[in-house]
C-alpha cells in the first residue's frame, strides 16, 4: 500500500473582522491596559455562522466532486461544537454531499484535538480518504485578553494514499495535567492561569520534551526543520520554544494574530496549511499542539506540492475579510448582549424534527429534482413538476455547487433579522432552477440584478428556547 | 357550458365600518358595525339571510378558527355559515361564496362579511407568520413589503427605469391616494402628504419607504346579495350587479422556473383577462370608470396598472406621472384612498373595495362622487407577486 499523507487542504475564515482598536476603545474607560493589544484585526462569526458552518465551508473547498466519493471517514474537531449530544460531523457529511456510508466522529476537549486527530488519522491506514474538519468559534468574556486574541475559523484536510502533498515522518505525544486554561462543562468562558508560568513551565518544558523524543526517534536534526507551527497567544512563546529546540528562527510560522486571531482547535492545522502554502518539495514541517500535554507531528512535503493549489488557501481566506468597527456587533453575534429586537423577534422557531428528517436531502444537502418528462430542475421538489406538472419521479439534482445569479432582490428593514437588513430575493441558477433565498455577505454598492452567487451553508433560524438551530443554504456574492 | 356570473346576482346592501386603530372595538364590534349598515341599506330583516360567508385571514391575531365568531357576533342562528381565508383575497372570497350561492339558487339572500383586527399585536405591520413545517426549513421569511419590493428591481431592470424615476413614480402613487383619502370619513388616514415627505421617509424594504406602504388598521365590510328579481321585489332601482368574479393562484412557476422577470404579476394578468371576458369588457382603459386595486405597496399599484391592461407594458410610470389615475384622470384609482389610507384589515379589504365601487355606482360617494360611473373594478393580491392569489371583481349597473 502506498504512502499515506495530506492530499488537500482548505481554510475558512469568516468574512467579518473586528478592528481590535475598536474593542480596546470600547473598554478604555475601565480596562485601559487592553490598548496594547488593540492592533490588527480578529475574525468573528456572523450571527448565522458557527463551527459547523465554517467546517462545511472549509470541507467543501477541500473536496472536488470526484474526491467526494472516495471519502470514507470524517472527523469533526471543535471545542465549540454547536451540539453537545447529536453528532455534528453527520451534519457536515450531509451538507458536503458526502456518501451516507461515511464513518463519522466528533472530537474535541482540547485545543490540540485538531493535531491529535490528524496524527491518529495518519497512523491509521484506511483504504479510503479521511477528512479532518477542525473549527472553532471561540467565546471570550467581554474585556478579557482572550476577546482580543481569539478568532474564528476552520480548516479541512483530506488524507489518503496517492497524490499526496505531504507525507508523515513521525509523531510524538505526551499527556499531563498541566492546565494553562480550562472550561468546565456548561461554562461559557475559558479560565486562564498566569502567562509567565504557562510559558516557562508549560510551553518551554512540555513541548521540547516531546519534540526531542520525536526528532531523536526519526534521526532528524532540529536545524533541518523548515517550518515550525506552534499556536500560542503568548507573545514570543513559539520563538522561545524554537530557540530552546535549536530550530532556525526563520522556520517559526506566523500565528496569524494580526489578521485572524487564534482559531482554537483549528489553529495548529491552520498554521500547517499556511506552511504548506509556502513550502517547496521535500521540506520538513513540524506542527505542535499544546494542552494538558502536547502532540508533535513531523511531515515532509512531496514533489506534488509544486503543482498543488488549494481552492481556499489560508492567505486567500484571510484576504476575503471586511473590517468592522462596530464592537456591539461582535457582542451581539456572539450572544454576549441581547439587543432589543422588538416583538417581531418573538416568533417561535421550533423545528419539526420529523419534517427535517423527511426533507434532509433538500434541507441539509440542497438537493433539488430534475423532471423525468421535461427536464426542469427545481427546488423544493414536491410531488409534481413545477414546469410541466408531470408526476414522474424527480431525479435528485444537487444545487449547492451550481452557478447562479440574482434574478430580483430587496433589502428588508422591517422583518426581524439579527444583522439587518435582510437581503432576500429570487436566485436564478444557470441550470434553470429558481429558488427564493436569503442573500448574505452583501456589499450593497456592488450588488444588483445579475450579480453572480454561490451557495453557502448557514444557520437559517435560531431557536432561542430549545437551541436546535435550523441550518439551510443561502446565496452569497462571489 | 359555463355562462359566467354576469348580472346573475345583485348587491342590495353594503356596509363598511370606520377603519383605523379601533382600540376600543373588538372584531365583533367591527362586524356588527358593518352589518347594521348593510342590513339597513338592504332594507331586509336579519332572518331573511339564508347563508353567510365570513372572511377572516389571521386566526391567531383575529378571532380564531371557524365561522362561529361571526355567528356569535351577529347572533345568526341555524343557517350555514362558512369561514374563508385566502390571504389578502379573503374579503373577495367571502363575496364570491355568497354570490355563487345565490347564483346557484341555493339561497335567496346571502351575506358576505369580512373583518380583521390587526391592532391587537402590539406592533406595526402584519403579524409575523410561519408558513408550515417544510417552508420553515427552506423559505426565507421576509416582511410583506420585502415580498413586493422584489417587483421594483424586476421592473426597473426590464424597462431600464432609473432607481430615482421609479422611486418618484411610486411616491406619486401614494401621494394621489392620500389626496383621495383626505376626503373619506371612513378612512384610517385622512390627510394629504406632500411628495417630498413621501420620498424622504425611512426605508422599509428597498425602495419602499414608510409612505410606500399601506396603513395597518382594524376594519370590517359587508355585502348582502340576492337575485336581480328579488332585488326589484325589495324596491331596489338602478341595480348594481356582479359583472365578474375571478381568481388566479400560483402553481410555483414564477418562483420555481426561469420565466418570470419580476416586472409583473402573472396571476393578476390571468384573472383580469378572465374577468374582462366574463364582464364583456373589451377595452378596460376606455370602459372602466374606476378601480380599487391592491395598493398594499405603491410598487404593487404601479405594476397592477399594466397587469390590468389599463397601462401598456412599461407605460405605467408615464401614466402615473401624467395623473391618469388621479381623481380627475382617465381612470381614477383608489378614489376612496385605497389600502394606503384605509389600511389593510385583510378579511375586510376586498369587500371594502367593493363598497366604494357600490357607493360610486349608486351615486352615494359624497365629495368623492365620480360622474356617471358604469363599471368599477376591484383587485386583491395575496401572498407575494411570485407566489400568491389574485382576485378581481367587477361591479356595474345592470343596465350596462
Image: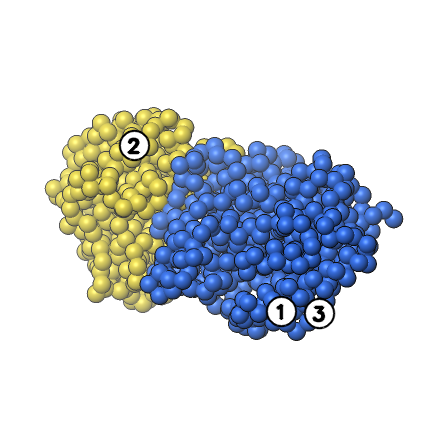
**Who is closer to the viewer here, A424 or B213?**
A424
Q: Earlier in the sequence, mark 1 or mark 3?
A: 3
Q: Could you tell me residue B253's position as x and y percent?
A: 51, 38
Instruction: Describe the element under mark 3 as helix, strand or loop.
Output: strand
Residue occupied by mark 2: B164
Instruction: Please tell me how many numbered marks the rendered image carries.
Output: 3
Q: Chain of mark 3?
A: A
Q: Which chain is drawn using blue?
A: A
Q: Residue at x 68, y 42 (%)?
A: A279
| Image vertical order of residue A276 relative to residue A297, above or below | above
Q: CA distance from mark 2 to mark 1?
A: 67 Å
Residue at the right extreme, as displayed:
A1
In the rendered structure, find residue A201 and report the number of the disc placed on it. 1
**Who is closer to the viewer here, A156 or B83?**
A156
Displayed quadrant of residue A386: top right
Q: Residues within 10 Å of mark 3 (few under 14, many from 20)?
A: few
Q: Could you tell me residue B305's position as x and y percent?
A: 32, 33
Residue occupied by mark 3: A175
Q: Could you tell me residue B390's position as x and y percent?
A: 39, 42
**Who is closer to the viewer here, B1 or A344?**
A344
Amino acid at each position: 500500500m502506498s504512502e499515506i499523507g495530506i492530499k488537500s487542504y482548505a481554510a475558512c475564515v469568516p468574512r467579518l473582522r473586528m478592528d481590535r482598536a475598536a474593542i480596546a476603545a470600547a473598554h478604555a474607560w475601565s480596562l485601559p491596559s487592553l490598548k496594547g493589544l488593540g492592533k490588527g484585526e480578529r475574525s468573528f462569526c456572523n450571527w448565522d455562522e458557527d463551527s459547523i458552518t465554517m467546517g462545511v465551508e472549509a470541507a467543501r473547498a477541500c473536496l472536488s466532486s470526484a474526491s467526494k466519493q472516495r471519502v470514507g471517514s470524517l472527523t469533526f474537531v471543535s471545542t465549540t461544537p454547536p451540539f453537545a449530544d447529536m453528532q455534528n460531523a453527520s451534519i457536515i457529511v450531509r451538507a458536503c454531499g458526502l456518501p451516507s456510508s461515511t464513518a463519522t466522529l466528533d472530537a474535541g476537549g482540547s485545543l490540540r484535538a485538531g493535531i491529535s486527530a490528524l496524527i491518529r488519522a495518519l497512523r491509521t491506514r484506511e483504504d479510503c480518504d479521511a477528512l479532518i474538519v477542525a473549527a472553532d468559534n471561540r467565546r471570550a468574556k467581554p474585556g478579557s485578553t482572550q476577546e482580543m486574541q481569539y478568532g474564528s475559523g476552520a480548516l479541512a484536510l483530506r488524507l489518503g494514499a496517492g497524490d499526496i502533498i505531504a507525507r508523515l515522518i513521525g509523531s510524538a505525544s505526551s499527556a499531563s495535567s498541566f492546565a494553562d486554561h480550562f472550561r468546565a462543562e456548561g461554562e461559557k468562558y475559558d479560565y486562564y492561569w498566569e502567562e509567565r508560568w504557562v510559558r516557562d513551565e508549560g510551553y518551554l518544558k512540555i513541548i521540547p520534551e516531546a519534540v526531542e523524543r520525536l526528532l531523536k526517534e526519526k534521526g532528524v536534526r532540529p536545524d533541518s526543520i523548515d517550518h515550525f507551527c506552534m499556536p500560542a497567544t503568548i507573545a514570543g512563546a513559539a520563538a522561545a520554544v524554537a530557540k530552546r529546540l535549536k530550530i532556525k528562527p526563520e522556520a517559526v510560522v506566523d500565528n496569524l494574530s494580526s489578521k485572524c486571531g487564534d482559531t482554537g482547535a483549528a489553529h495548529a492545522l491552520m498554521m500547517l496549511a499556511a506552511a504548506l502554502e509556502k513550502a517547496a518539495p521535500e521540506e520538513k514541517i513540524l506542527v505542535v499542539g499544546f494542552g494538558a500535554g502536547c502532540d508533535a507531528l513531523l511531515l515532509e512535503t512531496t514533489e506534488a506540492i509544486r503543482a498543488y493549489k488549494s481552492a481556499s488557501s489560508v492567505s486567500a481566506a484571510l484576504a476575503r475579510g471586511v473590517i468592522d468597527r462596530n464592537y456591539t456587533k461582535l457582542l451581539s453575534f456572539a450572544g454576549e448582549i441581547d439587543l432589543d429586537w422588538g416583538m417581531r423577534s418573538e416568533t417561535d422557531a421550533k423545528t419539526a424534527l420529523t419534517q427535517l428528517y423527511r426533507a434532509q436531502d433538500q434541507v441539509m444537502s440542497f438537493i433539488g429534482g430534475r423532471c423525468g418528462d421535461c427536464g426542469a430542475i427545481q427546488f423544493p421538489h414536491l410531488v409534481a413538476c413545477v414546469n410541466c406538472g408531470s408526476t414522474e419521479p424527480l431525479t435528485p439534482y444537487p444545487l449547492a455547487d451550481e452557478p447562479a445569479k440574482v434574478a430580483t432582490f430587496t433589502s428588508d428593514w422591517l422583518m426581524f433579522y439579527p444583522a439587518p437588513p435582510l437581503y432576500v430575493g429570487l436566485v436564478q441558477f444557470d441550470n434553470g432552477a429558481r429558488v427564493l433565498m436569503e442573500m448574505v455577505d452583501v456589499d450593497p454598492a456592488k450588488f444588483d440584478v445579475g450579480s453572480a452567487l454561490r451557495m453557502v451553508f448557514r444557520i437559517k433560524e435560531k431557536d432561542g428556547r430549545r437551541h436546535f438551530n435550523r441550518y439551510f443554504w443561502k446565496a452569497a456574492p462571489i | 357550458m359555463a355562462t359566467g356570473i354576469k348580472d346573475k346576482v345583485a348587491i342590495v346592501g353594503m356596509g363598511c365600518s370606520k377603519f383605523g386603530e379601533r382600540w376600543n372595538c373588538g372584531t365583533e364590534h367591527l362586524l356588527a358595525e358593518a352589518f347594521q349598515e348593510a342590513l339597513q341599506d338592504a332594507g331586509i330583516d336579519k332572518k331573511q339571510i339564508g347563508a353567510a360567508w365570513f372572511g377572516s385571514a389571521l386566526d391567531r391575531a383575529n378571532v380564531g378558527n371557524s365561522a362561529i365568531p361571526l355567528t356569535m357576533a351577529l347572533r345568526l342562528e341555524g343557517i350555514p355559515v362558512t369561514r374563508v381565508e385566502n390571504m389578502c383575497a379573503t374579503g373577495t372570497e367571502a363575496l364570491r361564496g355568497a354570490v355563487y350561492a345565490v347564483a346557484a339558487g341555493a339561497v335567496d339572500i346571502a351575506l358576505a362579511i369580512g373583518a380583521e383586527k390587526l391592532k391587537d399585536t402590539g406592533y406595526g405591520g402584519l403579524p409575523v407568520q410561519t408558513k408550515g413545517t417544510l417552508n420553515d426549513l427552506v423559505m426565507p421569511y421576509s416582511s410583506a413589503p420585502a415580498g413586493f419590493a422584489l417587483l421594483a428591481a424586476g421592473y426597473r431592470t426590464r424597462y431600464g427605469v432609473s432607481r430615482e424615476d421609479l422611486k418618484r413614480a411610486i411616491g406619486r402613487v401614494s401621494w394621489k391616494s392620500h389626496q383621495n383619502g383626505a376626503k373619506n370619513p371612513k378612512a384610517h388616514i385622512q390627510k394629504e402628504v406632500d411628495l417630498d415627505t413621501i420620498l424622504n421617509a425611512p426605508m422599509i424594504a428597498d425602495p419602499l419607504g414608510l409612505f410606500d406602504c399601506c396603513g395597518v388598521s382594524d376594519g370590517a365590510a359587508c355585502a348582502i346579495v340576492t337575485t336581480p328579481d328579488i332585488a326589484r321585489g325589495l324596491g331596489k332601482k338602478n341595480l348594481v350587479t356582479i359583472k365578474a368574479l375571478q381568481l388566479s393562484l400560483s402553481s410555483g412557476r414564477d418562483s420555481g422556473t426561469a420565466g418570470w422577470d419580476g416586472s409583473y404579476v402573472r396571476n393578476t394578468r390571468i384573472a383580469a383577462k378572465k374577468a374582462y371576458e366574463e364582464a364583456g369588457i373589451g377595452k378596460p382603459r376606455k370602459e372602466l370608470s374606476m378601480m380599487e386595486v391592491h395598493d398594499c405597496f405603491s410598487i404593487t399599484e404601479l405594476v397592477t396598472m399594466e397587469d390590468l391592461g389599463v397601462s401598456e407594458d412599461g407605460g405605467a410610470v408615464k401614466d402615473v406621472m401624467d395623473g391618469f389615475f388621479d381623481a380627475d384622470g382617465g381612470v381614477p384609482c383608489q378614489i376612496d384612498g385605497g389600502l394606503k389610507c384605509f389600511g389593510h384589515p385583510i378579511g375586510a379589504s376586498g369587500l371594502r373595495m367593493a363598497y366604494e365601487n357600490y357607493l360610486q355606482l349608486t351615486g352615494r360617494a359624497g365629495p368623492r362622487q365620480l360622474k356617471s360611473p358604469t363599471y368599477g373594478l376591484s383587485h386583491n393580491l395575496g401572498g407575494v407577486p411570485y407566489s400568491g392569489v389574485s382576485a378581481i371583481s367587477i361591479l356595474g349597473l345592470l343596465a350596462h
